[in-house]
Image (spheres, rainbow, N blue to C red):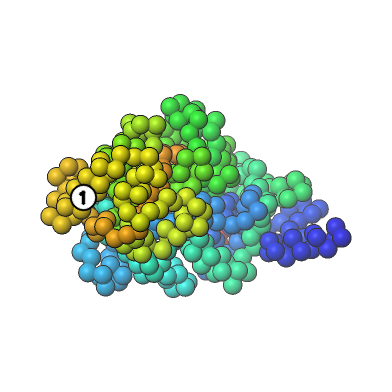
Amino acid sequence: MKKIFALVMSAVLVVPSLVGCSGIKSEKADVVVIGAGGAGLAAAVEAHDNGAKVIVLEKMPMVGGNTNRATGGLNASGTPHQEKAGVKDSQELFYEDTMKGGYNKNNPELVKILTTQAKDSVAWLTGLGADLTDVGRMAGASVNRTHRPTGGAAVGAHIVDTLKKAADERKVDIRLWNEAVEIIKDKDGNVTGVKAKNKDKKEYTINAKSVILTAGGFSANQEMVVKYKPELKGFATTNHAGATGDGITLGTNAGSKLVDMTEIQTHPTVVPGKGVMVTEAVRGNGAILINKDGKRFVNELLTRDVVSKAILDQKDKVGYLFFDQGMKESLKAVEEYFNMELVTEADSVEELADKLNIDKATLVESVNKYNESVKSKNDSEFGRPDMPRTLDKPKFYAIEVTPAVHHTMGGLVINTEAQVIGENGQPIKGLYAAGEVTGGVHGGNRLGGNALADIVTFGRIAGLGAAKTSK
């Protein structure tokens, strides 16, 4: 029975390469990718398509990492989908929004790459079969540029499925439950491979001329978070359990410089005690935030750090996302919150106030005032620039939210070719990185929708560069 169970598990996890790992002391590849999230899968597919033999190491039992949890979308400017929707945007405006959102702490050269090449990432993903036809808006954006599946469905898992399918079609060697423990360098400081442990904790070596670090950030490592930002002690996180900063440790042990490590972002709308993040697209599609007194208290489309602080200033450090049936119908991603029974619903605003134990008159007044602002196209109270709909179509809904640690903007220093930069200011030959393991792209605050743009854009750049180096 044990043998049958082992065979079944192996088939379910699709890890044929593990069978041959036991007892193998060393093997060869052109490129080793550490981390099978969105950045790692994008890098692996790109490296393969540029002639490299690729091995992907993933310490968790599944691919996707935090990308699986991304719901909002992928920011890009100049796409056919924007044009079809009548959105007037420019890469210059995208750049300005990103720099402003990051308080100009971002590396301008990296932001220029992100904002000019994100459209190519959308086209590339579309060519692989992804649906990114719906265009909405996230906080900090001047126009609608957040690309997502039809109807505003959750985007992250869809992108992971698209990239995993592409990797499987190319027969890329993806090894789950395999953890990288050291990046190997020669006496001249050039990368020569990786030491790893398989699922049985047996160590083996992969000799390779290029290594790509795509292991994500450290939001799920409370000790590391508090080391750099003590005021976040005790905060929950939206991240998956594997986001513990391993890639940053591997990179620094290999000689990488670090940047922006104290820049840690909280996401404002996370369900207390559940760790479930409510996508920013809910606010982008029209929801408002109210407090326990029934009052609206902030421009909901301000940057995440500002909205987080506003919620923490409220009674019990919580708020409620308030929306109606019209908003619900505009965004398919909302359905998962209903399935998880996180939503309070009612046939009227007054009934909802009773269920939330909020003063009815105050809540009704707040909602009416907001609806008048939508009609007059002027939010005189908080200056919200984009109000896509009135909230007056029964039923009415509320989700309790509070901030949680969401994204670590700091990490390994990279250049525009995704090469990791050493302490001497020079690229470490053969070492690349992309995604949340790196720093510099987002500065002091990441805009919603820029993470997916980051991981795919720089993941592809890293994959191309690593493939060239390996040859």
Snapshot quadrant of residue 229: top left
Q: Is residue 299 above or below residue 285?
A: above
| 171 relative position to 360: left or right | right
Most foreground residue, 138 or 376: 376
Q: How far from the left and from the top, in percent, is residue 288?
A: 29, 48
Q: How far from the left and from the top, in percent, is residue 150?
A: 39, 69
At 49% across and 47% down in the image, what residue appears?
Answer: 276
Snapshot quadrant of residue 118: bottom left
Q: How far from the left and from the top, in percent, is residue 274?
A: 52, 43
At 40% across and 53% down in the image, what residue appears?
Answer: 345
Q: Is residue 47 above or below residue 207?
A: below
Total marks placed: 1
At 34% across and 45% down in the image, what residue appears?
Answer: 353
Most foreground residue, 99 or 152: 152
Which part of the image, by quadrant, shows the N terminus?
A: bottom right
| 290 relative position to 155: left or right | left
Q: Crowding near pointer 1: few (<14 within 10 Å), some, many (20+)?
A: some
Most foreground residue, 335 or 59: 335
Secondary element under disc 1, as helix, strand or loop, is helix
| 439 relative position to 468: left or right | left
Residue 364 in sight from this viewpoint: yes
At 23% across and 57% down in the image, what residue appears?
Answer: 390
Q: Is residue 396 above or below residue 364?
A: below
The outermost residue toward the right is 1
What is the three-letter code of the residue carrying label 1? Answer: Asn
Most foreground residue, 216 or 171: 216
Q: Which residue is mark 1?
A: 368
